[in-house]
Amino acid sequence: MPSAPATPLAAPSPDDVRGGVRGTYIAFIGCGFAFASWASRIPQVRDHLHLSPAQLGLVLLSIAAGSLVALPLAGPVVHRLGSRRTVAGMAVLLTAGLTTVAFGYLGGLLPLVIGLFFLGFACGAWDVAMNVQGALVERHLGRSIMSRFHAGYSLGTVAGALIGAVMVALHVPVTVHLLLVAAAIGLVVPWGTRTFVHDGAGVEEHPEEGGRRSALAAWREPRTLLIGVFVLAFAFAEGTGNDWVGVATIDGYGVPAAVGTLDFAVFLSAMTLGRWFGPALLDRYGRVPVVRALAVLGIAGTLLFVFAPMTPLAFAGTVLWGVGVSLGFPVGMSAGADEPRYAAGRVSVIASIGYCAFLAGPPSVGFLADHVTVLRALTAVAVLLGIAALIAAVVAPPNESAPAATAGRPATAGERAESRDTRRGA
């Protein structure tokens, strides 16, 4: 006897969706705040342990290693536990990792690396889960708001960087600073996720395919893999800014540590503005032309930052760099979630590929810096953004899955234009 057709779950109420929006913002902001709080103290940790650029790159590698272990597991975990439980659990793990870092760096490299590994593991699984929730809320709202959730992440990083700059200026110990951040994350984020929309709400269940199909088959999909490469290029540009802008400004332009941390905050602020105002551009012009133009802007900004004859111009380059990389990662996540049934698996695959940039980025920049200085090593960002601009067409909504991508809402003008372009072979 044939099995009965699967029934879609009831759509969430407007109040539930609004609650999901609030919870998703809390998750994104909390993740960004935690990461930037650590990143704002990298120069002090480096000086305490007397690390060379190459050694610092290897230390930062431990964060990426933790994320890369977590990311392939995140799709099946989110499918089984849901995005709410995954984010709440990873917030607790991140609290433990940040606490280990706070005390561990005083004892040497090994405890620092262990703490950073768990920090990276928590951030990796947390990243997939909150992007799955963000894509779900975006579909129910009927508007392109994923980049605004990522703007929330950037807002969290700006707050973390600015507070970090104040902590540096006031000579607050790294340990005290990071312990306060860990306590805030462990309390606020699990509370905030209580309002998440159920992951299956409004999406038809397909038990015969299940999470394993979604997680594993995505690794054989050419479009998913190319989106991963696209995200990798933008992730390299973004991650390099996060890890190295402060150090490059201090070492390359001979400014005090507080000024270098301020330039890091400028980078994050520019990225936040790009993500907040980006949805209007995406809805009007479509994904492809917008991310291509921003990639070119990021190339110009990076080169200006590296070759500026004076510090104020370097700050201007930082602004262009931050705006240029603002939409690449969120657009890649939205593209991966175009078909709701396979969102968790595809987002997991795309994030896994993208996070390779965080694995390769710190050591590659560090090794280059040993030969050409930290500042000149950042020209690698321009190369990766050039690749992203060349393959940007891959994030256009596919013509076959466009109805799924816009399920429950009318297609935006940008999506209609991109769908026409796809059918024409653009």
Image (cartoon, rainbow, N blue to C red):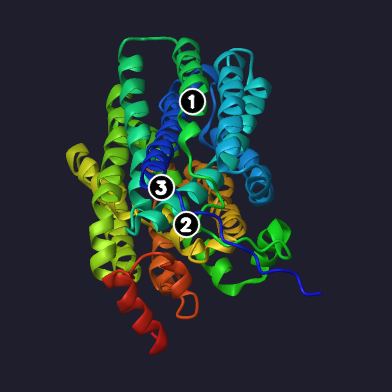
Residue at 30%, 14% in the rendered image: 169
Could you say where residue 100 lies in the image, as x and y percent from the top left?
61, 19
Q: Secondary structure at mark 2?
A: helix
Say which residue label 2 marks: 333
Query: Callout 1: few (<14), some (14-19), or many (20+) C-alpha neighbours within 10 Å?
Result: some
Q: Is residue 137 visible?
A: yes
- Residue type for callout 3: Ser
Q: Secondary structure at mark 3?
A: loop
Residue at 48%, 28% in the rendered image: 189
Disc on the earlier residue, 3 or 1: 3
Disc on the earlier residue, 2 or 1: 1
Could you say where residue 343 lies in the image, as x and y percent from the top left?
55, 59
Residue 191: image tag? 1
Q: Can you tell which of label 2 and label 1 is closer to the viewer?
A: 1
Say which residue label 3 marks: 13
Q: CA distance from mark 2 to mark 1?
A: 25 Å
